[in-house]
Amino acid sequence: MIRPFVNELGDLQNKILEMGGLVETSIHNTIRSLVERDEKLMHGIWETENRINQLDIEIDECATRLLALHQPVAKDLRFLTAAIKINSDLERMGDLAVNLAQRSISLLSRPPFKPLVDIPHMSKIVEAMVRKSLDAFVQRDAQLAQSVLMADDEVDELKNTIYQELLDLMEQGQAEAAPAFDLIFIAHNLERVADHATNIAEDVLFLVKGIDVRHHHLSE
Amino acid sequence: MIRPFVNELGDLQNKILEMGGLVETSIHNTIRSLVERDEKLMHGIWETENRINQLDIEIDECATRLLALHQPVAKDLRFLTAAIKINSDLERMGDLAVNLAQRSISLLSRPPFKPLVDIPHMSKIVEAMVRKSLDAFVQRDAQLAQSVLMADDEVDELKNTIYQELLDLMEQGQAEAAPAFDLIFIAHNLERVADHATNIAEDVLFLVKGIDVRHHHLSE
């Protein structure tokens, strides 16, 4: 039995939202666990990663099946190609959440060498970017998508601040190389999650307004 | 005038090959410039990045247009969804090539602190992975795609060796933090390029054999 196209699109959208929610929760719990120095808060992160990978396959299959069965045009076609791209961004974010957890476990095995202020601040912005980019997708909300693009600059700045601070601590002999690296990679991976949320927001803008905002410097 | 579908597919394939060639050359020239300490070899890398970004947009437009105009099914549909995903991997590789160049410029501004052996070795493997993954795509060659998956493990090991060596040098006070970081990020970004080549090889295996090799641990 073929389900109505609009229901199928709704299912696809729900899977994407589920995936986004899992990514956001993984990142949130990992950073909380790092700040509170409580490894238990990372419990369940590997199961979550498995579910994210399963959703990756399901979403791809679903989008390809809908393209084949319904041969959509215009907006629906753009929605499905956007779904394929957003899915691939979410899957990478899932991988990055696992990397964050691995670095955090490594950090929790050593005594703390500095209070963490910028990292949880950065994480909060990044989590909001993930959530907003997907809300913008579901609600076809260009303004919300635009707000994600703007937040990306703040994340870049925070990453540079964290990087420079750790470099200084190391050069003054106040931080060991291995844990400082771990923190730098955590900031780096959070920035990469933000980049993926930005990609999603750009896909939403293309979906809603038909303007391609990627590589906008090309036309500057 | 509508061009025959098969010609349009050929054009799309050529654009993807052009993009892959540009990525490979950028990485090759950047690492050569780093090893030979000759910044001139990086000349033209920003123009190449612009061309890669232009191709990213062209390939997406082309694939979406072909989906809409010809409403392909089965193999052709899978080819076009693969093209959309491969395009997004190539675009990220282009960004990574730029990051490699930025880190290299930073390293060339300081005196060398160690001879570079593992990095050019790693780069050579990664460049071959990029080339092979796209050759496998064009020739629908599952065996070649499989060889890309196998090379990925070697790249991961090399990255870990480089990482550990630099960490040791820093902890023994034989390397400053900033240039050691630059080298670690270069190894890290080369590994990410290898990951993208692996994604492409997985897409090729799905295209040719219809088996999904992503997240294969799920079924283990």
Image (cartoon, coloured by chain):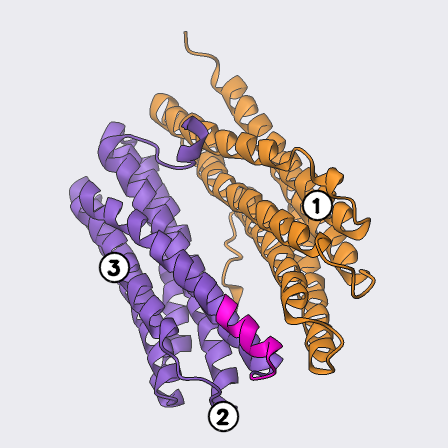
Chain colours: A orange, B purple
Residue underneath mark 3: B131
Taking the magenta stretch, the answer to whether it contains residue B24 is: no
Spatial CA distance of label 1 from label 2 is: 39 Å
Q: Which one is closest to the eye, mark 2 or mark 3?
A: 2
Left or right position of A148 against B208: right
Rendered location of residue A160, percent (x, y): 68, 71
**Residue denoted by label 2:** B111
Quadrant housing residue A13: top right
Q: Nearer the viewer, residue B37 or A175?
A: A175
Q: Chain of mark 1?
A: A
Q: Is residue A139 visible?
A: no
Name the spot of residue A45 as percent of width and height, x first.
Answer: 63, 37
Q: Are marks 2 and 3 in contact (CB under 8 Å)?
A: no
Looking at the image, tell me whether mark 2 or mark 3 is earlier in sequence order.
2
The answer for which chain carries disc 2 is B
In the rendered structure, which amino acid carries the disc numbered 3?
Arg
> In the image shown, does A79 or B88 lie closer to the viewer?
B88
Q: Is residue B5 visible?
A: yes
* Residue B7 in the image: above or below residue A47: below
Residue B165 in the magenta stretch? The answer is yes
Tell me the magenta residue range: B164-174
From the image, tell me which residue sits under label 1.
Answer: A30
Q: Amino acid at mark 1?
A: Thr
